[in-house]
Image (spheres, rainbow, N blue to C red):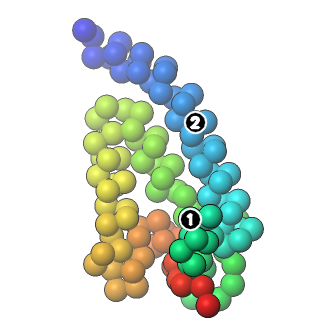
Amino acid sequence: PDAAALQAALTDVALPVTLVMLAVALVYEVGFLVWRSATPGKMIFGTVVRPLEAAGPVTLTVALRRQAIKVVTELLSLNVLLGLAGFFLSVLDPAWLLWDPKRQALHDKVAETVVVLKR
């Protein structure tokens, strides 16, 4: 089969699904972070997201920046070749906190946030 035609066919199917998935994820994550400083999962574990250098809730802009890596990895996955880079980025993002002194994942670094235990 023609690789370009296959890529185009896959993109025709994957693009709408990816865009809907991204929209739902953005509304969910950003909405909860701005409203409650935590998603339901973080609330269960007693953690909140806050700006790195200040106490208090995150702003809409910060919450959107925090989702930037997820958006980039999902968009990269629409292309076969770039999808590999997106895969490595999606693995590296949460793994980063394992060796980071401030225990920040890459999405926390981008948004200048940190996840802390609620007191």
- The amino acid type of the residue labelled 2 equals Leu
Q: Residue reaching furthest front?
A: 44
Q: Quadrant of the C terminus?
A: bottom right
Residue 78 horizontal/vertical position (percent)? 42, 33
Position of 36 with respect to 15 (left or right) is right
The residue indicated by pointer 1 is 41
Residue displayed at 51% across by 79% down: 114
Secondary structure state at the residue bearing disc 1: helix
In terms of depth relative to the viewer, which is nearer, 75 or 35? 35
Q: Is residue 61 visible?
A: no
Q: Amino acid at mark 1?
A: Gly
Please, is residue 45 above or below residue 19 in the view? below
Q: Nearer the viewer, residue 75 or 17?
A: 17
The residue that mark 2 highlights is 19
Residue 68 tag number? none
Q: Position of residue 45 (x, y in %)?
A: 53, 74
Which residue is at a point 62% across and 58% down the rendered structure image? 29
